[in-house]
Structure formats: C-alpha cells, structure tokens
Amino acid sequence: MSREDYEVIIGLEVHAELSTKTKIFCSCPTEFGGAPNTHTCPICMAMPGTLPVLNEKVVEYAVKAGLATNCEISKNSKNDRKNYYYPDLPKSYQISQYDKPLCENGEVEIETKDGKKTIRIERIHIEEDAGKLNHDDFGGGSLVDLNRAGVPLIETVSRPDMRSAEEAENYLRKLKSIFEYIEVSDCKMQEGSLRADVNVSVRKKGDTKLGTRTEMKNMNSFKSIVRAIDYEAERQIDVIENGGKIYQETLRWDDVSGKTFSMRDKEDAQDYRYFPDPDLVAIKLSEEYIQNIKNSLPELPESRKQRYLEEYKLSEKDAKLITSSKYLSDLFEEATAICNNAKAVNNWIISDISKILNENEMEPVQIPFNSKQLAKLIILIDKGTISSSIGKKVLAELFNNPRDPEEIIKEKGWIQISDEGAIKDVVLKVLKANPQSIEDYKGGKDKALGFLIGQAMKETKGKANPQMLNKMFLEELKK
C-alpha cells in the first residue's frame, strides 16, 4: 500500500503560560529570566508544611480563554493531584485538573486548502508548570532551576480532528492569535510561553478505529511541529507496512537529524493516580462572574479582520495576515492613527516588515520598534524628505537599533535631494553618459526611462526625489 492509502490523525495539547504577575499558588514573580532559583519560595519549592493558595487571576484568565474558544464554562470545578516523579517537580505531583476542568466542549474554526474547518476542543484546564533542568554537557550532570515551577498554565486539549501538519499549524496559530488578543498569555514561543504536545497516529483510509498514538512533548516552533508530524506519520506507515507494531510512547523530536527518538512509554490517565487536592477548596463560579468576563472580552481576530475589510478597504489576504497577530494588528492601527495612511502602513507590514521577520525567524512580538517610529518613517516618505528606497534602509536600521527615524536619516546623511538645480545636474550627467538610452526611448522603448532613473538614483545613492527625476528626464527627453 502507498502513503495515499493512509490517513494521519493529529491532536494537540497546547500549554500557554498565563500573563499573571505571580505564580498560581504563591506570590513569587512569573517574569521570564532571572538567575536560577531566585523566583522561588518555600511553597513553589514544596517545603514540608507549606500550603498552596489559588491565584484568582488564573481562574479569570482560564475562563476568558474558554469563552473566546466557545467552551462551556463549569460552575463547579476542582484541582487534582497528578502524581508522577520528575527531577524538576519538587512535590512529585503536579496540581492540575482531571475530571472537572474549568472549560469543556469548545471549538475554533481554521482555514484549510479545502476551505474552513472546525476543530473541536475537548477541554481547557489550569495547572502549574514544572521547573527546568539545565544540563551540563561538560560536567556530566544537571542542575535544577525552579524559577518556572508554579508558573500558571492553561492546557487546551483538542479532539483528534486534524488530518495534516498544515491543519495542525493553522490550529496552533489560531489559538496563539486568540490568546494574544484576549491578553491571557504573551505566547512567546521562543521563551516557552506557548508550547504543544503533539499526538500522531495513522490508520488506513476507511477505518473508523483510531490507531495507536505517539506523543512528541514540549514543541515550541511551528516549523519543527510541521516537520515532526510529517516525519512521524511516515515512520508509523513504514512500520505498519513492514509488519511492525506502533507502541504508545513519548518521543523526542531532534531538529538537527529530523527524526524522532523514543523516551519512555506513554502513560494513560490511570497511571497518574489522580485524586482531588485536599489543600485546595473547590472552584465555584456564579453566572454573574462568567457573564462579567464575557462582557469584558476584547475584539477577536475574526471580528477585527471584518472591520479592516470594511473600514480600511484592505484585501482579504492582507487583513487576514495582519489580524493573525495582535502585535501586528496593534502596530497597524496605532501607526495608521498617527500618519493617517492605512495603505502605506499595510504595505510596509505586509511586504518589508514581514520579509524581515521571516528571514530572521522572528515573531511579531519581537519587532523592536514601535508604532510611532513606523508612522514617522511613513510621514517622512509622504513629505518627500526621503525616498521609498531610503525608507527600506531606515526600516533595516529600526530593526537593528530602533530610534527616531529622523535621527537615523540625519545621522546617515540620507535626506532626499529635492533641489531642482542639483537634480537637473544629475539628469544631464546621466543623459550624457547614456546616449543609447536616449535613442531607445525616442524609438518607443519606455523601459529606457526606468533605466535612466535607476542610474540617477545610483548616482545619488538613492537620495534623489524620484518624482522630480521622472519629471525632469521627460522634459529633457522631449527636447
């Protein structure tokens, strides 16, 4: 049988670190970084005799995430102990939620090559993060950093509704976008604020029973997730085709070799010996509490996209790209409000800014300059102070060392030449050096004008006013 005779089944368990100021059960800070074990206290280090106290903001953020993903919100939920041992989990259990999560039965809509598709969400629950092991390749040991222990998470568990790596990527991007918009998580994948456990199985087309799944843990790169799913699906098909058996196990994805490696058998729910945490009371929510959070939800990506189509007359493609990220969307709106040129802001974001982000594998949240600086760049071009080609140089400088664009062009000597006398000198010099282009233009070859303007821009290092150049070349060529 061939690859086309099989169907890939994918489900994601997405962990998002919540943007609360303090941890889930203590008052230690949640900010990223800091020297190892400096954001800790007896509670998150699991010292004997300490008791957890639930951070109310964690519940609010989880309910907000549930409402934004069309979940049913439970008015009665609880915290449970999930028992397992890891070196970076001091208690030897994790406080999570088992049979009574805060949010259940949600769904989000994604775009696929075949049109829109609904991905069902089984549940969203709250839990604490574990610490981190820092491995010393030279000393041969590992050191435990508990700064991350107790950082609040929401885990969003999908149904196995995705059928390709592309669908899984689109679903994860959609969740990321929603969580950014409602401001429950900064979703900085490079810092581990958003990561996914990827479950993959295969079955022959036409079968209704799910195959045995494998799980790839803690993946925090879209590119790696796509590669890992494609590889693991192919691996499972090869095993089955060669008469082998797929085992339920946890795998490690190695980005360098592009392969998965077995870590351990994958546990089932009963292996964790869940039971209600006796140190925490049940979580009871009123209808009024839920409704207040619902009323406070901000504009979500789909709604904002529709508004951009109507208010700013953006194309469907451009509106979709810009609103896919709250950071890009805010940059667009704020810069447009300052420079009053939505078309130019859109063009800079869609083309040059997106290109730099892609080339450097950066997320929009990593854009180092602000909306005022982007708007100032566009105003300088609109006023004729600099040309668009110089604008591209200023943008590159904004990425490398963000500051006032006016400062940049003065410092670099990039102010546009708009003096008629100076431009005429350049035009005459270029015409004298290119008699063939004059003949070509007079012979009906309009491209010759573009060549001459290009030569003049080269002569002035991109600083000549292109509109003035165009006008003066035409005047001279008609003589």
Image (cartoon, grey):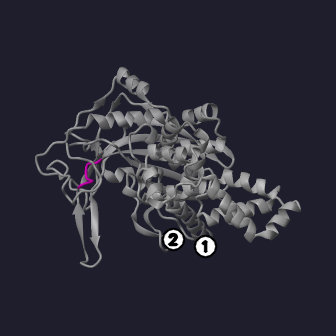
Q: Which mark is residue 77?
A: none
Where does the image place residue 252, in percent across and percent down from the top left? 43, 66
| Amino acid at the residue labelled 2 | Gly
Q: Does the magenta stretch include residue 215?
A: no
Drawn side of residue 197 relative to residue 429, left or right: left
The numbered mark at residue 258 is 2
Is residue 215 visible in the rendered image? The answer is no
Q: Kindly give the residue lying farthest to the top in the view shown.
A: 288
Q: Disc 1, disc 2: CB below 8 Å? A: no
Q: Which residue occupies 40% across, 33% down?
A: 64
In the rendered image, the quadrant that contains the N terminus is bottom right
Crowdedness near tag 1: few (<14), some (14–19) or many (≥20) residues, C-alpha within 10 Å: few
Where does label 1 land, which residue?
242
Residue reaching furthest right?
Answer: 443
Q: Is residue 423 above or below residue 296?
A: below
- Closer to us: 88 or 100: 88
Q: How many marks?
A: 2
Magenta-highlighted stretch: main secondary structure?
loop
Residue found at the far left of this picture? 49
Q: Is residue 128 visible?
A: yes
Q: What residue type is labelled 1?
A: Asn
- Marks 1 and 2: which is nearer the front? 2
SS class, disc 2: loop
Q: Bounds of the magenta span? A: 147-151
Query: In the depicted view, which residue is nearer to us: 48 or 374?
Result: 374
